[in-house]
Image: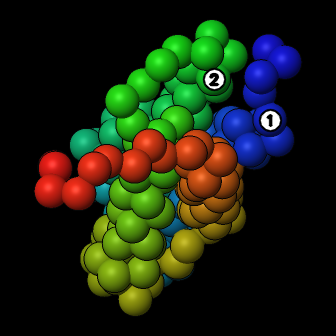
Amino acid sequence: MKRLTANELVAMFGGLLLAGALFANWYEAVSPLAELAGATGVGSLSGWETHDILRWPLLVMAIAPFILAYIVARDHQLTWARGELTAVLSIFAFGALLYVGVIDRPGEPAGQIELEWGWYVALLGSVLMLAGSALRTGETVRRRKPPGTI
């Protein structure tokens, strides 16, 4: 555990925020005529209730910083820079959250569905995961290859 730095702790905190925010309110239907995830009328739904497929990848992405911390704590040797895969997964989580929150918000009509605080917490969690894992990736010194090799 002595090998863990603040970068891994930030990424793990972001993973906790993302996982916890899945069960918080993400969307609120503000019109009695609005339909959100099969429910009609005014009310709030969590990301877990709304997204049948996306919830599983987001949950796996929230676990990634803990796997990174395990790799760092056990000092496992990898063929890629530590934190690189977690950074890629957190970029995907950030993009997916922006897509379902800003570009293609679920529900009909989309103008009657507003974002709740849980979506913002999930977005913050993905940003913290990205920051912690990207800083961890930057700590790894990459070995140079001779010219002409792949």
**Residue type, numbered disc 2:** Val
Residue 13 has which mark?
none
Q: Residue at x 61, y 15 (%)?
A: 75
Residue position for label 2: 72
Residue position for label 1: 5
Q: Residue at x 23, y 57 (%)?
A: 147
Up-down relation of residue 109 to residue 42 (above or below): below
Q: Quadrant of residue 22?
A: top right
Contact, mark 2 vs mark 1 (Cβ under 8 Å)? yes
Asked if residue 18 shows in the view, the reply is no
Q: At numbered mark 1, what does the secondary structure look like: helix, strand or loop?
A: loop
Viewer-closest of 129 and 70? 70
- Could you tell me residue 103's position as x and y percent? 34, 81
Q: Earlier in the sequence, mark 2 or mark 1?
A: 1
Residue closest to the far bottom: 111
106 lies left or right of 143: left
103 lies left or right of 26: left
Viewer-closest of 79 and 46? 79
- Could you tell me residue 8's position as x and y percent? 71, 37
Q: Quadrant of residue 102?
A: bottom left
User: How crowded is the residue under tag 2: few (<14 C-alpha within 10 Å), some, or many (20+)?
Assistant: many
Q: Residue at x 48, y 19 (%)?
A: 77
